Image (cartoon, helix red, strand yellow):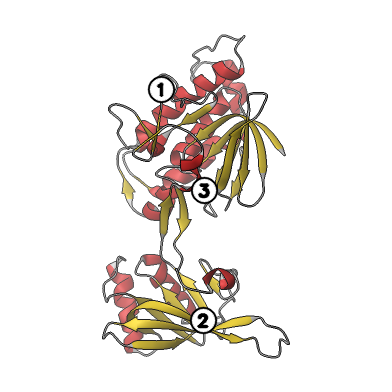
Amino acid sequence: MIQTKALIIGAGPVGLFQAFQLGLQDIRCHVVDALPQVGGQCAELYADKPIYDIPGIPLCTGQELIDQLQTQIKPFAPQFHLQELVSELKATEDGQWHVQTDKGTQFKAATVFIAAGVGAFVKRGLSLPGFQELLGKDIFHKAPNESSFKGKHLVILGDNDASLEACAQWRQGANAAASVTLVHRRDQFQAAPQAIEQMRAACSANSMRFVAGQPTALIQDAAANSGSSKVNLSGLEILNSQGDTEVLTADALLLCLGISPKLGPLSHWGLALERKQLVVNTETFSTEAKGIFAVGDINTYPGKKKLILCGFHEAALAAFGASALLYPDQKTLLQYTTTSTHLHKLLGVS
């Protein structure tokens, strides 16, 4: 059981800034996110896209913003628990909160900050029999290492930059796959024009193949010489653009399908919801449950605008609210990082 004064659910830009604002109140925290890296939707969907409305930063990409936020919170050393989805949140007898993830990690938190955007972002998978059993074995969201698909018949699913970059990576070089096949439901792509041109040129040169179709089944064979009931992926059945069933040889499957938000267990935590968003008090961005705050796109209130900069404002007021709750006998003072020697000490600057 991990005891903490503050637990943040969500490691997107608002969740990261929440960790910074808590740090300024001398409140250390843990951060949980369902994705394998920090950044949330900002890093997953807008990593290379420009953002123009961050105060004081005329232009940055989504990934650059996340990198800067990570640098900013370093003095407070928040502890991250990635690839973990919060599955349970319930009050304890002493007025704190018991939080558990799907990996079994348990927290006892005095305050909880829900910065989960429009829900927990999870990697898109396939709703096909056998998918969960093969995930991490023959099916991957990301290559485990640089030689994972060497000599294998690799099928890549997706229409984005990540899928085309994977095609380029695995069709050539010392660790090249035996074959590379790209599958998407139609011959249109949401990727950089240059990457699309390179993919089409590779198809023309027979160094890879593109097939328009929709996956319909995973083909599995008993593991050779295993002496057990274990099975391996041997192919992917698709319904092609002509309406015919086709089986593609596949030793490995790489999914580049992006992410999708899921409200998930949050809807069962007993918190007041309005159109799948948490209702908050705009003085402290607290929910109706004492000690639970909601910041960013997950909350709602009159005049709510789903902007990153609004989430930053909410995080600041939530941190002051948490400080007042955690230290009721202390007056919560407004201090400025420009002049406060106390904040300078917390930030580790002279």
In the image: residue 195, left or right of residue 174: left
Question: Which amino acid does the dot numbered 3 rest on?
Answer: Val
User: In this image, 208 relative to 26: left or right?
Assistant: left
* Residue 249 can be seen, yes or no: yes
Real-space Cα separation, disc 3 to disc 2, in angstroms: 30 Å
* Callouts 3 and 2 close, C-beta under 8 Å: no
Image location of residue 317, percent across then percent down: 45, 22
Residue 267's x, y, as percent? 46, 42
> Relative to the observer, which residue lies in front, 231 or 252?
231
Amino acid type at mark 2:
Gly
Nearest the eye: 80 or 245: 245
Residue 146 is drawn in which quadrant?
bottom right
The label nearer to you, 3 versus 1, is 1
Closer mark to the observer between disc 3 and disc 2: 3
* Label drawn at residue 38: 3
Mark 2, secondary structure of its residue: loop
Residue shown at 51% from the left, 81% from the top = 173
Asked if residue 79 lies left or right of residue 308, the reply is: right
> Mark 1 packing: few (<14 Cα in 10 Å), some, or many (20+)?
some
First in sequence, mark 3 or 2: give its number.
3
| Mark 1 secondary-structure assignment | loop
Q: Residue at x 45, y 72 (%)?
A: 166
Residue holding disc 2: 173
- Up the image or down, 144 lies above or below 151; here it is above
Q: In which quadrant of the rendered view does residue 164 lie?
A: bottom left
Judging by the rendered image, the residue that carries numbered circle 1 is: 281
The residue depicted at 62 percent of the width and 22 percent of the height is: 345
> CB of mark 3 within 8 Å of CB of mark 1?
no
Quarter holding residue 305: top left
